[in-house]
Amino acid sequence: MAVVSRGFGGRRQVDPQVPPGQYRTDDFPVLTAGPTPLIGTVNWTLDVTGVDGASHSVSWQQLMALPVEDVTVDLHCVTKWSKLGTRWRGVPVAEVLGAVGADLEGVEYVMAHSHGGYTTNLPLRDLLHGQAWVAFEFDGSALAAAHGGPARLLVPHLYLWKSAKWVNGLELLREDRLGFWENFGYHPYGDPWREQRYAGD
């Protein structure tokens, strides 16, 4: 009788384009922490709140007047699907912060706020230098409400829960503070290539 070591399962196919534990999908699954809000662009605003509590709002018209970038990025969801080569249009977060004259002295973290009360925390450095956008188009069309429209945060190098849908606020922080899913045990950073799904990973 052949002896097989416990846990032996043969050689697994490794896809170098997706992080460990992820699988490719051509779909764009819809996952939310609550009901989908329907938000018009007429009354849409993004509030940037400084560490001193002062807040400055960006209207939809002001957002559209800022420099726009077309980006093609891979998405990685904590539920283990990856969608490669997705096409977006949006305004770099750095441009939004610059437009309101945000004082970044001493700022280390940002809490993203969304319609419906959702929050997620990110290091400021991960929102700058061409790494994050306020995205309003997907695949050549206006961003659908189910995917966060009219505008969502897009931070593709982190798990997708960090790319807050229906974003309406960026709160600048000196110290880190956990957001919605992070308070339920998700990893405070969420690097898919390091499989940082849950606290302690």
Image (cartoon, rainbow, N blue to C red):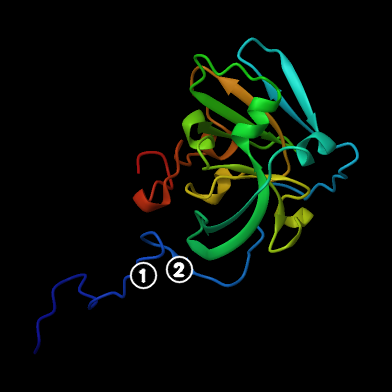
Q: Earlier in the sequence, mark 1 or mark 2?
A: 1
Query: Which residue bears the numbered disc 2?
Result: 23
State the count of labels.
2
Question: In this view of the protein, which residue sits in the foreground, 1 or 14?
Answer: 14
Residue at image location 73% in from the left, 43% down from the top:
166
Looking at the rendered image, the disc whose residue lies closer to the viewer, 1 or 2, is: 1
Above or below, 109 relative to 66:
above
In the picture provided, is 134 more to the left or to the right than 37?
Answer: left
Q: Position of residue 27 (x, y in %)?
A: 61, 70
Residue at image location 47% in from the left, 31% down from the top:
125
Q: Quadrant of residue 137?
A: bottom right
Q: Which mark is residue 15?
A: 1
Residue at the bottom extreme, as displayed: 1
Q: Name the amino acid type tagged 1.
A: Asp
Q: Position of residue 141 (x, y in %)?
A: 76, 61
- SS for dot 1: loop
Residue at image location 54% in from the left, 65% down from the top:
85
Which quadrant is the C terminus positioned in? top left
Above or below, 53 relative to 100:
above
Q: Position of residue 48 (x, y in %)?
A: 69, 24
Q: Position of residue 115 (x, y in %)?
A: 76, 38
In the picture provided, is 97 more to the left or to the right than 187?
Answer: right
Disc 1 and disc 2: Cα gap in Å? 8 Å
- SS for dot 2: strand
Residue at image location 52% in from the left, 56% down from the top:
77
Question: In this view of the protein, which residue sits in the foreground, 194 or 141?
Answer: 141
How crowded is the residue under tag 1: few (<14 C-alpha within 10 Å), some, or many (20+)? Answer: few
Q: Name the amino acid type tagged 2.
A: Tyr
Question: In this view of the protein, which residue sits in the foreground, 183 or 127?
Answer: 127
Above or below, 144 relative to 161:
below
In the picture provided, is 27 more to the left or to the right than 177?
Answer: right
